[in-house]
Amino acid sequence: MSVVSGPEAVVLGGSGVDTIVYVPVLPVPFADSYPVPTIETRAGQTGDGVTLGLHALGVRTALLDTVGGDREGELVRDLHRLRGVSFIGVPTRSGTKRAVNLVSPDGRRLSFYDTSRGDPADRFPQPLLSDLVRSARHVHVSITSPCQHSLPLLDSFPVTVSTDLHDWDGENPYHAVFARRADIVFMSATALVNIAATMRKILAFGTADTVVATAGAAGGYLLTRQDGTVREYSAAVPPGPVIDSNGAGDAFVAGFLFGHLRGEPLPLCLRYGAVAGAHACTIPSTRVDPISREALLAAAGSG
């Protein structure tokens, strides 16, 4: 398990394999069977997406996660090996994480996560994690086991920490564990009844300086501890037809963190995130094609 030399960013958790099914409509009406154009199994869940997105933007990045000794684990290893990205896999008896994603013609997604893939006893070895994080400037923590048990160790290092709560409802205590320990908290606005109140709650009970709630084509919301006002930001125009929203949130995170690592102001970080997310919506889930640094800078109007 070799570690990439001097990673700038480390991603913890979130590797896995998805089976992609393009369906005619969501929700899918009951029927005995449906002919569909594509059923394909490929590696690439949230941690993979953030890692590959940062790598494509020129950020030296390493991913640490548990992985099974199964076919799906090989798919994950191959995904990163073929792109020259450091993947450090800690063996787990529960097998590699997997999911089934239904994708409609308008790009919407419905995911089914296999909750049996994750042993509560799994842990990242502390010496391995320490060696990996020691040279890093930022750590992005996925909300998967065993990442929550690694959060206290990160306090020992001069790194900023982010997490993505995805479709948190604002109440589930599992997600709150991650939100309390992160400097930057991302989440989707989809399941939130009161977006502003939830964002303020994160600042109140945790150490976060920045909270971002994404809202897809509607843009999203930003709240900082320094400002205290929930402000809206605009979405970016996709560079082509929207065909698949899989990975758009992970692309947003990668774009935002690229700006964060460059020391850019928050409005530009949000712009980078929006552009990267819009690009992802034009790429089918069956392909891995994150936006390049050159394309991002050109689309965002910066150099």
Image (tube, grey):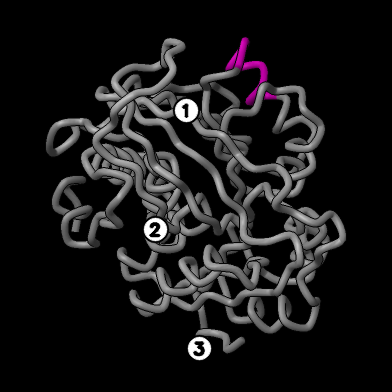
Q: Which mark is residue 52?
A: none
Secondary structure, mark 3, is loop
The nearer-to-camera label among 1 and 2 is 1
Which comes before the other along the chain, label 1 or label 2? Answer: 1
Q: Which residue is mark 2?
A: 258
Local crowd at mark 3 within 10 Å, few (<14), some, or many (≥20)?
few
Which comes before the other along the chain, label 3 or label 1? Answer: 3
The nearer-to-camera label among 2 and 3 is 3
Return the residue nearer the eye: 40 or 291: 40
Q: Which residue is mark 1?
A: 110
* Mark-to-mark CA distance, 2 and 3: 19 Å
* Mark-to-mark CA distance, 3 and 1: 38 Å
* Region rendered in magenta: 192-200
Kind of residue sitting beneath label 1: Leu
Q: Which residue is mark 3?
A: 5
> Magenta residues: mostly which secondary structure?
helix
Local crowd at mark 1 within 10 Å, few (<14), some, or many (≥20)?
few
Could you tell me residue 85's position as x and y percent? 42, 76
Residue at 37% across, 68% down:
55
